[in-house]
Amino acid sequence: MSQHPAAIHASGQADGPFNPGIGFSDPVFQSQAAFRGLLAALSEPGTIHDLGPFAPCPAGLEAATATLLLTLADYESPVWMPDPWQSGEAGAWLRFHCGAAAAAPASAAFAVAPADQAFPGLAPFNPGNELYPDQSTTLVMQIDGLTNGDGLDLEGPGIPGTRRIAPRGLPAGFTAEWARNARLYPLGVDVILVSGSRILGLPRTTRIHAPDPRA
Amino acid sequence: MSFAAQGDTPYNYAYLDEQTKRMIRRALLKAVAIPGYQVPFGSREMPLARGWGTGGIQITAAVIGPSDTLKVIDQGADDTTNAVSIRRFFERTASVKTTEATHEATIIQTRHRIPEAPMQAGQILVYQVPMPEPLRKLEPRELETRKMHGFAEYGLMQVRLYENIARFGEVTTTYDYPVRVNGRHIMAPSPIPKFDNPKMDMSPCLQLFGAGREKRIYAIPPHTRVVSLDFEDHPFRIQSWKQPCGLCGAQDSYLDEVVIDDAGGRMFVCSDSHYCETRRAEGHAGPMLGHQAAGTLAAASTPAKEPRP
């Protein structure tokens, strides 16, 4: 409808009126509840937490990804997404509801990626620096499922002994890449695995290894 | 559930605006991912002076929700000024349930103690921290201490402890005793007595630390190694007392020394007021319980149901 080029760009669509999608209906309490899920997920890596339903999601994003971005992202935290999303409905939705700027992977506070061929690996993202390891990217990886996949054992802070997870659809070579990320400690990328409305946290302190076949 | 609809406050839920909460929440998630590392955050003005627990209050405000139950302690006691006013602050701004029972609380905000009752999985312990930088008295420049943490250059801290031993025969630090978290970062545990340091190690609860004036947040996830610094030939040890609590007879709790007359009389009582009351209610009695001076002390430590005006 609008002839203004900026409006056309913001909608991500060359035709039709601007459609901002939906945000939280009750921002204070929805973001508080979602944050507690995120806090529990990252402080007890490998545990699965449900952030609750969110629909309709912008094209490409899972419900938990949308909830996470509405809870944490704003004008202080640039977000990277792969290009069809960044320039499309998801990018427009993010800019409208969170006011978050688009960023390159190396300067993103948050990054959202599918675990398919578009997944760029962990290396392009910001691991922080020696003085400020907290300035690293938090990567949200959308995968097929958080259960019923190949078993992996987790160890590290937040885990009494070891904790078994079985995510489905992790990119090939992820555990090797994660081991490289862990060697950067205290620098490194933190990962949140997402499937549907559920999340599983993998902070940089978590060590991942294949289950011991003798066990 | 609409808090604003109640119309009893002009402020947002839990006082802080949503953008501030997001900023604190982002800092908290990074703090959890790097245990013991101090994350800078944009500490806000709060309706009480810095140094009165504004860091802990901001963390609690960013974490708390209507289904939480909050306990606030100051030096172990539920009924001292700081604890009463912070508890009332969250009753009014977050319409949250409060309690004095450690096991009922989902969030415990504390100044300078860890409760005696064991912490449980799922609980969040929020510390008020005056001085988050354990190296500050050794190196006043922030950029230098940041580098020391970045490169794990902690020799200076070992020298400080060594000089203590060389001069006094033991490490004389009794509170805010430095710890190493997850085998990497040296961290100030806030001015808790060193008696409480072992409770931080592999605790099932999540521990969050907020320093409002110094604008730092840090954290210890559950089940994380927290080791008090020591030497092989001078191992870390906690305080001990020759007598039990005068009121409840506890031999396993941290005791405060209380002067009871002007003739040098004194008694030792639990600093954790809820622990002491629980034990007395269970029938435990200390040697001083019937004593005249102890009578006023026991009465005074009975919690006021309503905050005094």
Image (tube, helix red, strand yellow):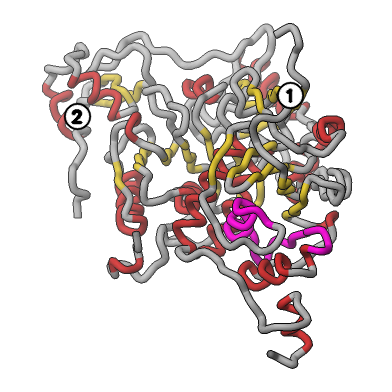
* Chain that bears disc 1: B
Instruction: Tell me where residue B123 sits by quadrant.
Output: top left
Identify whether B149 is placed above or below B19.
above
Q: Residue at x 11, y 22 (%)?
A: B292
Residue beneath the point at 64% across and 60% down? A73
Q: Is residue B309 left or right of residue B89?
A: left
Name the residue type under label 1: Val
Mark nearest the camera among 2 and 1 is: 2
Residue at screen point 67% across, 39% down: A145
- Percent of width and height locating residue A141: 73, 46
The residue closer to the viewer here, B259 or A51, is A51
Q: Quadrant of the N terminus of chain B?
A: bottom left
Q: Nearer the viewer, residue A148 or B133?
A: A148
Give the SS element for disc 2. Answer: helix
What span is colored magenta in the figure?
A: A61-84
Which subunit holds the residue at mark 2?
A: B
> How far apart are the two marked residues, 2 and 1, measured between alpha carbons?
43 Å
Which mark, by number, is residue B225? none
Which residue does the numbered mark 1 point to in the structure image? Answer: B159
- Residue B273 lies, with reference to residue B59, above or below; the image says above
Return the residue at label 2.
Answer: B297
Q: Is residue A17 visible?
A: yes
Q: Tell me where residue A61 appears, x and y as whole percent.
A: 68, 57
Image coordinates for residue B112, horizontal then vertical, percent: 45, 35
Residue B137 is at least partly visible in this image: no
**Classed neighbour count for the residue bearing mark 1: other residues with Cα under 10 Å, few (<14), some (14–19), many (≥20):** few
The C terminus of chain B, quarter of image: bottom left
Query: Nearer the N terminus, badge 2 or badge 1?
Result: 1
State yes or no: residue A81 in magenta: yes
Residue B161 point in image, percent of width and height: 67, 22
Q: Residues within 10 Å of mark 2 (few under 14, many from 20)?
A: some
User: Looking at the picture, which amino acid does disc 2 mark?
Assistant: Leu
